Image (cartoon, rainbow, N blue to C red):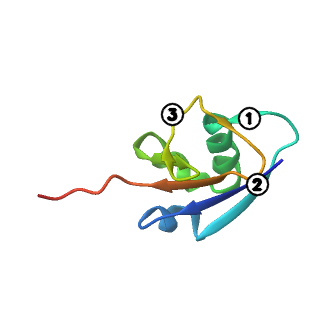
Amino acid sequence: MSVIVTYTGKVQEYSHAQETRLDFYNFTDVSGLLKALVTRFPEIDRITRHLFISVNGKLATRDQAVCDGDEVNLFFRMGGG
């Protein structure tokens, strides 16, 4: 199973990448995907609880399944006002 993860805005500073391809051999969910990313990019661990995650363009929960070919995006909520 292969998943493409993209990083928007400031999240790129923690991943040092714009995009990452992750391969999983078993079923995983968003939480498992985040654990795999922390293994690859330890600095992301500092921000995981603040991240918003979308799967195929829709906001996702941490227990949502991730399937082969999904596109996952990590981003911070836009602020201002």
Lower position in the chain sequence, tag 3 or tag 2: 2
Disc 1 crowd, CA 10 A, few/some/many (<14, 14-19, 20+) = some
Q: Say which amino acid is labelled 1.
A: Thr
Q: CA distance from mark 3 to mark 2?
A: 19 Å
The residue drawn where x is 85% and y is 35% is 26
Contact (CB < 8 A) between labels 1 and 3?
no
Find residue 81 and report its image quarter: bottom left
Q: Is residue 31 left or right of residue 46?
A: right
Q: Which residue is mark 3?
A: 61
Q: Is residue 2 above or below residue 60?
A: below
Q: Say which amino acid is labelled 2.
A: Leu
Name the disc covering residue 28, or none. Answer: 1
Q: Which residue is mark 2?
A: 22
Q: Is residue 59 above or below residue 17?
A: above
Contact (CB < 8 A) between labels 3 and 2?
no
Q: Secondary structure at mark 2?
A: strand
Location of residue 20 in the rendering, given as x and y in whole percent from the top left corner: 69, 63
Q: CA distance from mark 1 to mark 2?
A: 11 Å
